[in-house]
Image: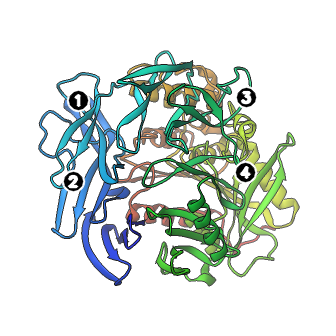
Amino acid sequence: MQISPSGDRMAFVAVVGDQRTMALADLKTNTTLGTVGVGLAKVKAIQWVGEDKVLVTTASTESIPDFGISKTEFYLGQIFDPARRRVTRMLNGAASVFPALMGMPRVVRNNGAPLVLVRAYEFDRQNHMDLYRIDPDNGRPRAFAPLSDKVVDYVLDTQGNPVAKAEYDERTGRWSLQLKQGDDFRETFTTTALLDRPDLMGLGMNGDSVIVWADRPDLTHQGQGVRGLFDVNLATGVWRSLRFEISPQRPLFHPVNGRLVGVTRRDDDGSRYSFVEQGAGELWAAVESGFPGKKPELVSWSDDLRQAVVYTSGDGDSGAYHLVDLDDASVSTVGSAYPTITPEMVAPVRLVTYDAADGLEIHGYLTLPPGRADARGLPLVVLAHGGPEWQDESGFDWEAQAMASRGYAVLQANFRGSTGYGLSFLEAGYGEWGRKMQTDLSDGVRYLAGEGVIDPKRVCIVGASYGGYAAMAGPTLDHGVYRCAVAVSGVSDLRRMIAWEAAQGVRKDNETVRYWNRFMGGDGPGDRSLDARSPARLAETADAPILLIHGRDDTVVPIEQSRVMAAALRRAGKPVELIELSGEDHHMSREETRTQMLTETVRFLEANNPPGAPSN
């Protein structure tokens, strides 16, 4: 849901069944300006192009055999003009340009006017994904700035001109920052980062610098470990570490001039913000005062920072969008994420903390069945998040809420390797697939059992992506804890997964492979030590029934990972079900198959761990 530059209009996507419709509304007159159906397309973003048009970016899973491309996500851009009742496809009418977008398009300002930019591959220039300017009236591209395939980030000034770019060589790990000084770009800094490369993110507070996110080391003082934002002067190339009231996870930039206005992060209490721009700070102060006891999150804001769309969810709130207007000091609800779920249907969520076996403090969330906040001896579902470099939060979670509505307590633990708890906590997960990351989950089971909240004999584990791996690892590596497991889009064979990733890039030792080796604790595609932590190679040890669910269009974890696991369990004579979701990707983007996944999960849980059947 995106507010227009003036704050007078709203663009949003409504979902009915499996069909998506984008609508534009006038907030002053409460009228609909226009709608356009996007069908089954997976909407990734909507952006205003001025006050009258909206850019919709969608994704689809496609194969192009002539290019040797099998099952990859392609992005397409369409510009909707309600006044003309016209939808225009980006990169239209350019025979020399590949029609798919190479990354998300950007709408920036050129002396106040909207400028639509996108990277695209030009057939006539090998290894070039140049930056193109799109005509919003006809979608046609025009060369804007040449960029080699090594350019990973770029920054524009307030006139829409490139002033900085970052290049990265995946083979060597060489990252370089180039700044526009005079008529040319000059390389001002280089470092080697096979992993954790810096990110060039946007303009600094005054427009005379750029913002770089650096994981480590502190690039201004070699050897000092600092993770955060740096301000790099465009004229001198000097780096300066930035400090805020909170430890930032993401910078925020002004919608008009693109300059840094603040930072945000997520922690156990929801989203937090720290602003360095007065108008943005005043807007956030109004938001905080307008939602006492809630955990508001900024979604979009007007050019003058006087209106904002805010999202809330949590106790008694299944997710709602609100319009905050500073000019008339008003707050109004403009949309609901789940309109059929009433406040009394929302299960309570509370923060839990416990110590892992080695003493590391683990934070998580416990969702309890509605009306049973003081119940004892409940059946439990451990819901493991994906990533694993991710973070569960305290807001409304549709999976946890669905299971709680059936009578289960649901534990979502932010095990080591999760984000949100500092760099050392994240690094504690390196090499811990199937090891301490796994026992962090079962330590949570033991903690809740010791508190009397759950029945330790009635526990199942559910998860997707990395969580799917954790779900399969429960019955095969952490025995005697779970009565059943549901793995969605999970990794079952670590060595096979790394080999698949190695085949996707131009080099076997690509950046993604290096990332997985670090987290899994492996040493490349041929490392047989990974077999000892691969559920598919431990199928004969499984001590609980397993349900496998996987989308056939998954381009992140191939469906073969679930097929291999199912075959191994069947050979071992173990109970297993495999459900393949037609047309679904890794992210469960389609409502129909997402509902199917959830329905099958609940069915399997109730069959193998009935919520109304306490143990003896």
- x then y, percent, for residue 419: 66, 45
Q: CA distance from mark 4 to mark 1?
A: 49 Å
> What residue is pinned by disc 4?
245
Disc 1 vs disc 3: which is toward the camera? 3
Which sits earlier in the primary sequence, circle 4 or circle 1?
A: 1
The quadrant where residue 10 appears: bottom left
- x then y, percent, for residue 531: 61, 27
Q: Among all residues in the image, which is located at the extreme top?
A: 172
Position of 202 with respect to 220 (left or right) is: left
Task: Kindly identify which numbered label has been placed on residue 67.
Answer: 1
- The answer, for residue 340, to whether it is visible in the render is yes
The quadrant where residue 65 appears: top left
> What residue is pinned by disc 3?
225
Callout 4 touching callout 2 (CB < 8 Å):
no
Tell me if residue 456 comes above or below residue 121 in the rendering: below
How many neighbours does mark 3 have within 10 angstroms: few (below 14), some (14-19), or many (20 or more)? few
Tell me if residue 288 comes above or below residue 197 in the rendering: below
* Tag 1: amino acid: Phe
Position of 276 with respect to 415 (left or right) is: left
Which sits earlier in the primary sequence, circle 2 or circle 3?
A: 2
How many neighbours does mark 1 have within 10 angstroms: few (below 14), some (14-19), or many (20 or more)? few
Location of the N terminus by quadrant is: bottom left
* Tag 4: amino acid: Glu
Which sits earlier in the primary sequence, circle 1 or circle 3?
A: 1
Which sits earlier in the primary sequence, circle 2 or circle 1?
A: 1
Position of 124 with respect to 216 (left or right) is: left
Q: Residue at x 79, y 76 (%)?
A: 375
Q: CA distance from mark 2 to mark 3?
A: 45 Å
> What residue is pinned by disc 2?
136
Q: CA distance from mark 2 to mark 1?
A: 29 Å
Callout 2 touching callout 1 (CB < 8 Å):
no
Find numbered disc 4 in the image and state the secondary structure of the residue it sits on: loop
